[in-house]
Image (cartoon, rainbow, N blue to C red):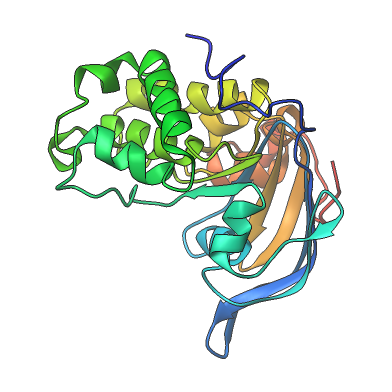
Amino acid sequence: MMWYRNTPFTLGGRREANLWVENLSAGYGNFLVLRDLTFEVQPGLTVILGPNGAGKTTLLKALNGLIRRSGTVLLDGEDLPEKTHEIVQAGVALVAEGRQLFPQMTVTENLELGGWLVPKAERTRRIEQAFTDFPKLKERAQQLAGTMSGGEQQMVAVARAMMCAPRLLMLDEPSLGLAPRMVDELLGMARRIADAGTTVLMVEQNVKKALAVADRGYVIERGTLVASGPATLLARSTVVREAYLGVSSSAAEPAARQPAMA
C-alpha cells in the first residue's frame, strides 16, 4: 500500500516542513517540565525517545498550543502561532496519545470532522482517498469508532489528522497498547507518510522499532536533551542501548551524552 503518495493528502507542490525549536521551556503552572530544549525537525521522520515522565508528551502539547511555552519555534523560518487553531491552519496536526476519537460517531463521521474546514466536495474526495489507503476503514465506514480495536482506532486517528493535509504530522505514542503486528503496521505507516512528503515528528515508547523506521532521533531525560543523531547511530549509542535496550556498556559503542544536532 503506497501511503498517500500522489494523493490529495500530499503537499501539492509545497516544500516539506522544517521545524526549528530553540530554548523551549514548558510545563504546568509554575512547574517546568521542559527546560531550554533546542533541536530541529527536518523533512523525514524524527523520533523523540525517553522514559516515562521525561516530558515527551509535554513537548508535543507545547508545540500544538495546548500548554504555554517560551522560547523560539519556527516553521520554515516563520514563528509558529501559539493558538491551536492557528497552528492547524499553519499546517501542523497532532494525533494525541489515546487517539481522542468520538466513540459514538462512525468512522466516516470522525473523518468528516478532520476535514471540517475543507469545502464539502474536497472533503468527500479526501474521505474516499482515505478509504482507498485504509481498506480496513472502508469495510467499517459505518461502524462506531468506539467499538473498533485499538489498532483500527489508531488508523482512524491518523487518517482524520491527514484530512487537513498537514505539512507536519505529530504522533504521540502511536503504538501504545497495541499487539506487535499492529505496532509494525502503524510505524510502517508513519514511515510511508514521511516518504510521501509530510514531515513526521513522533514520540514513541518502542525504542528499537521506532529507531528502525526513523531518520533521526532525540533522547529526553528529565526535560532536557541528553543525546541526538541519526537513528542508525542512536541505536548503537550507549545512552540508548543501556537505558532502553538492556545492552551493557561493553557491548555498546561510546556516545556523548550532550545533545548534538543531526
Determine whether, in the image, residue 74 is placed left or right of residue 196: right
Q: Position of residue 109 (x, y in %)?
A: 26, 39
Question: Residue 205, can we see it?
Answer: yes
Q: Position of residue 117 (x, y in %)?
A: 47, 48
Residue at 32 percent across and 52 percent down: it is 100
Q: Looking at the image, how many numbered discs can be counted on the residues? A: 0
Q: Is residue 73 above or below residue 17?
A: below
Q: Nearer the viewer, residue 7 or 170?
A: 7
In the picture, the quarter occupied by the C terminus is: top right
Residue at 34 percent across and 24 percent down: it is 182
Q: Nearer the viewer, residue 114 or 213?
A: 114
Q: Nearer the viewer, residue 33 or 257?
A: 33
Q: Is residue 227 above or below residue 160?
A: below
Determine whether, in the image, residue 152 is placed left or right of residue 4: left
Q: Nearer the viewer, residue 139 or 220?
A: 139
Q: Is residue 92 above or below residue 215?
A: below
Q: Position of residue 59 (x, y in %)?
A: 60, 62
Q: Position of residue 233 (x, y in %)?
A: 76, 31
Residue at 60 percent across and 77 percent down: it is 68
Determine whether, in the image, residue 257 is placed left or right of residue 60: right
Residue at 69 percent across and 74 percent down: it is 25
Question: Residue 55, can we see it?
Answer: no
